[in-house]
Image: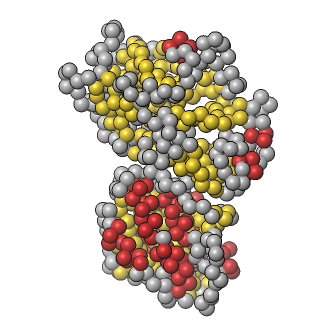
């Protein structure tokens, strides 16, 4: 079936409040910031006459959009601008921190032409994904350089039309299939493609929307809709930036990526607790295993008190292929917090020993219990810290060069409704800081969050922080959302949430659910969505009082 049709320009009433329709949801709150690390963002924008409202909306909010990108990237970003009608124009290719050059080009965009539907959105994507030159194509300007390997790679597509290549004809079974092939190419290159659909013409939605949704679904990007007149386009862009361009989680295993399913040189335990008066009712058993078949290892464990932020520490020797168990009631009785285990040498200096795994068995008087694997951080350098004899402290850098990167944006991928008798605890921890025992280890700020129900209705909210560890039950009042929690996560339904630390520190965490009348009991670590390369631990250098063999 070939489709070539025409639309006349329409005038839409001015809305007193903006609407953003995301998967059928109206959002009227400003998106939150998320610290993502290095960002490469390519704007691929339909600048035909019917997109005038969207372009005006983007221009009005452009400073806020660019501010979001600077904050989310830690000022390590590159931006590109590609527009399309029935041809493609590369207005700006990627360049380092190029706010000053791309901003006037976006402000100069003018909506005109393109009376025919479809438009060349697919070819614009082809240009960006495959770094195409203009030669031999209906394209102005070369798209080079391409995305950086180490950056979060993001395309934001904005259009109201089906894709039709350069021939201005949309054919079912050809152009939609070709559009999907570009999404697959993006996925293979780890590029997140987010699609913002402007429903200018209601009669086109049945054709356009599935294609736009497929872009997002295939690449784990966002699919968002605006109001019919384009109001909410800027808010949609900011929502995408706030989520680091992706609805998925970071891969669980890979170079520089911390994981609970690999061995490492540093292990992070999200929770320990005990009641010395009733240790059988509330206690934690920490397990550490040395998987190396030949070498023993000394491990230094820091136990961080969530109330004061002050750590204490112990040493342990683990022979090759052996494991040890430690109970919180015997090591740090009556204290609740988190633990960090670090492989060290005979001088107490951190070493590369990527053979440690661990887990914790947590039981609480409230009925909550879980087995939580330790999250492992590998040492990447043969000498992961700089140390000179006599140094009293060393700095462990989680920068993707010395040690794995540190988590900055986290997901609670699923939590049940409290109306079904569920009690879900959310534990959030500061990762990184000062372990010298002279000062509190450090805290994280408030947590800018996006809260979703299982209809993907989203609400922006801040979770209170300013602590080294927070533990709160997910229920009415936490998070404080309107409508309240149980009106959004109703009986028989579930939700999920994404958040980052508002002050840019690294965070980790877990959830533990208890329901005496359900099989849904236990806990799991939070999923990391974005990583950072600026976190560190400062630890005192202390010689162990024993040798290890």
Vertical comparison of 261 with 109: above or below:
above
Give the percent coordinates (x, y) of residue 188.
46, 56
**280 sits left or right of 253 in the view:** right
Is residue 123 in sight in this rendering? no
Position of residue 337 measured from the top left corner of the image (x, y, whole percent): 52, 26
Residue at (43% x, 42% y) in the render: 505
- How did the renderer colour the structure? secondary structure
Q: Observer-nearest residue: 14 or 97?
A: 14
The x, y position of residue 249, in whole percent, is 52, 47
The answer to whether 498 is drawn above or below residue 98 in the figure is above
* Rendered residue at 59%/43% (across/down): 412
Going 60% across and 26% down the picture, which residue do you hit?
371
Q: On the image, which quarter does residue 341 sit in?
A: top left
Q: Is residue 296 above or below residue 107?
A: above
Q: Residue at 42% of width from left, 40% of height from top?
A: 406
> What x and y, as percent, mark residue 499?
54, 47
Q: Quadrant of residue 329?
A: top right
Residue 227 sits above or below residue 32 on the image: below
Could you tell me how many numbered marks the image carries?
Answer: 0
- Pick the residue in front: 462 or 95: 462
Query: Is the N terminus in the top left, top right, bottom left or bottom right quadrant?
Result: bottom right
């Amino acid at each position: 079936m070939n489709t070539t049709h025409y639309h006349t320009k329409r005038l839409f009433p001015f809305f007193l409040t903006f609407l953003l329709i995301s998967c059928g949801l109206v959002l009227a709150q400003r998106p939150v910031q998320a610290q993502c690390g290095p960002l490469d963002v390519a704007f691929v924008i339909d600048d035909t006459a019917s997109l005038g409202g969207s372009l005006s909306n983007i221009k009005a909010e452009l400073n806020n959009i660019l501010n979001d990108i600077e904050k989310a990237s830690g000022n390590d970003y590159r931006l590109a601008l590609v527009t399309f009608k029935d041809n493609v124009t590369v207005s700006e290719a990627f360049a380092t921190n190029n706010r000053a050059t791309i901003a006037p080009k976006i402000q100069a965009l003018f909506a005109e032409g393109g009376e025919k539907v479809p438009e060349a959105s697919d070819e614009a994507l082809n240009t960006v994904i495959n770094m195409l030159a203009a030669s031999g194509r209906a394209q102005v300007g070369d798209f080079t350089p391409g995305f950086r390997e180490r950056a979060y790679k993001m395309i934001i597509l904005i259009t109201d039309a089906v894709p039709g290549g350069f021939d201005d004809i949309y054919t079912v079974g050809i152009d939609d299939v070709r559009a999907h092939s570009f999404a697959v190419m993006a996925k293979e290159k780890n590029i997140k493609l987010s699609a913002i659909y402007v429903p200018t013409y209601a009669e086109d939605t049945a054709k356009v929307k599935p294609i736009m949704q497929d872009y997002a679904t295939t690449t784990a990007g966002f699919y968002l809709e605006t109001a019919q007149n384009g109001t909410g386009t800027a808010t949609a862009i900011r929502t995408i930036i706030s989520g680091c361009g992706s609805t998925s989680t970071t891969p669980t295993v890979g170079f520089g990526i911390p994981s609970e399913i690999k061995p490492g040189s540093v292990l992070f335990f999200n929770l320990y607790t005990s009641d010395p008066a009733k240790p059988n009712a509330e206690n934690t058993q920490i397990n550490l295993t040395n998987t190396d078949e030949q070498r023993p290892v000394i491990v230094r464990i820091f136990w961080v008190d969530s109330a004061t932020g002050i750590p204490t520490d112990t040493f342990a020797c683990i022979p090759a292929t052996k494991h040890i168990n430690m109970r919180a009631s015997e090591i740090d009785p009556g204290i609740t917090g988190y633990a960090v285990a670090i492989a060290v040498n005979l001088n107490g200096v951190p070493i590369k020993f990527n053979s440690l795994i661990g887990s914790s068995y947590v039981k609480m008087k409230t009925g909550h219990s879980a087995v939580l694997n330790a999250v492992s951080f590998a040492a990447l350098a043969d000498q992961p810290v700089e140390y000179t004899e006599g140094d009293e402290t060393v700095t462990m850098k989680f920068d993707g060069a010395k040690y794995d990167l540190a988590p900055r944006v986290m997901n609670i991928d699923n939590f049940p409704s409290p109306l079904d008798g569920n009690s879900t605890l959310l534990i959030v921890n500061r990762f990184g800081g000062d372990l010298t025992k002279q000062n509190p280890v450090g805290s994280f700020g408030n947590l800018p969050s996006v809260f979703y129900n299982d209809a993907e209705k989203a609400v922006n909210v801040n979770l209170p922080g300013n602590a080294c560890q927070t533990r709160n039950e997910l229920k009415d009042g936490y998070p404080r959302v309107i409508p309240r929690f149980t009106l959004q996560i109703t009986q028989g339904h579930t939700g999920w949430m994404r958040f980052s630390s508002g002050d840019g520190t690294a965070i980790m965490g877990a959830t533990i659910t208890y329901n005496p009348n359900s099989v849904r009991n236990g806990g799991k670590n939070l999923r990391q969505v974005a990583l950072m390369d600026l976190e560190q631990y400062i630890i005192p250098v202390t010689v162990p009082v024993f040798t290890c063999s």
